[in-house]
Image: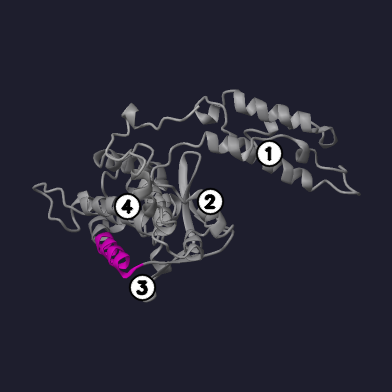
Amino acid sequence: MHLHIKPHIGDVLVVEVTDKLLDALYRQLETNPCRTNHGKPLGPKTVLHVHNIISAALDTVTGPTRLLTFNPAHYAQPPTERQIRAVEPDRPTLTDAETKRILSDIWTPCGNRRCDGGLTHHCLRDAPLWTSYAATGCRRSEVLGWMWDLINWDECSITLGWVVIEEGNAFLLRKLTKDGEDDAVIYVDRALMDVLWWQWERQQYEKEVLADLWVDHDLVFARDSYKLFKQSNAGGPQDPEKVSARWRTVRSRQALHEAFSLQGWRRTKITNDLENKENPVEVSANARHRSGPGFTMKYYGQRRADNTKKLAASTANRIGLAGAVPACRRTGLAGRAPGDPSSLPVLAP
């Protein structure tokens, strides 16, 4: 609202807003450089979001006894879903085998002479964090907001009550409101609970080392003592951007696609769950998609070449395609290379 709407049409009277005015705004946002988007114009998805905000605002003053008799935004032409899909970036995912390999690597001690392979060396400080992203598919802000008091060790469940967000140059804790529900609960495997218990033991070691310098916020993945220049931050929330920067270092070391961000773990988990024929209702509920399984399968289900080949083979088996091969051989084409011009049938005029 403050960046893309008020600077352009903020001084226009509500009764003077027309669909042509809105169309001009959308085209302007799509073509003019934006200072908050690294000097590039806004993408179609963001422009559509701007349109939805304007449309919802005008709906509040539309009606027989209100300022507007009809909503001009309903007649405007924002970017279409096809335009949005056309410019969507490549969003790579990992297979389960690749995920297993990466998790095994990040839990391998560095072998430095000071490394004991346990709680004291920094080489494994982020291993529980990356494992939590891979195992749960939670968003970056949600995992950073996990709290010890919200973990039910007996039921193997985690209540998502808080997130760590950025506001200006600061980062702080805020109540979770992303999915429109308070204190959403996810269920995890006992193996992940063991990982979190390892993280708890490591954090106790950090508390002993820092003593009074540790300000406890009850965070599972709190700021630790490694390269701690502002010691008052120990025990508080981590800077989300620095967490992403550390992940980019791991991503480079693992030779992963440069577009595989922390969000890629969420997409990977959902895609692999669907690929392994897990119940879409449960997959959607675990991802906390309010729109249900349809949204989950539309936006997170991803085609892979191996699965496409399996689908083709399944179709061929069901329709008995293999039984048609002898008939093809009788045409005299068997044994010839596909690229051989002599293999092409001669059609009568």
Report crowding for label 4: few under 14, some 14 to 19, many 20 or more residues within 10 A (C-alpha): some
Helix, strand or loop at disc 3?
loop
- Which circle, 2 or 3, is nearer the viewer? 2
Residue at image point 34% right, 27% down: 341
Q: Earlier in the sequence, mark 3 or mark 4?
A: 4
Residue lying farthest front?
A: 348
Compared to 164, does 28 lie above or below? above
Q: In the rendered image, which residue does mark 3 sit on?
A: 153
Magenta residues: mostly which secondary structure? Answer: helix
What amino acid is at disc 3? Trp
Name above or below for residue 166 compared with residue 284: above
Q: Do we see residue 34 in this rendering?
A: yes
Q: Around disc 1, counting alpha carbons within 10 Å, would you say few (fewer than 14), some (14 to 19), or many (20 or more)?
A: many
Distance between mark 3 and mark 4 Cα atoms: 20 Å
Q: Is residue 163 left or right of residue 108?
A: right
Badge nearest the viewer, 1 or 3: 1
Quadrant of res 55: top right
Q: Which mark is residue 51?
A: 1
Q: Nearer the viewer, mark 4 or mark 2?
A: 2
At mark 2, the secondary structure is: helix
Q: How is the image coloured?
A: one colour
Where does residue 334 sit, x and y in percent of width and height?
30, 40
Q: Which residues are magenta?
A: 189-204
**In the rendering, which numbered label is found on residue 130?**
4
Compute the Cα span from label 1 to label 2.
22 Å
Residue 145, can we see it?
no
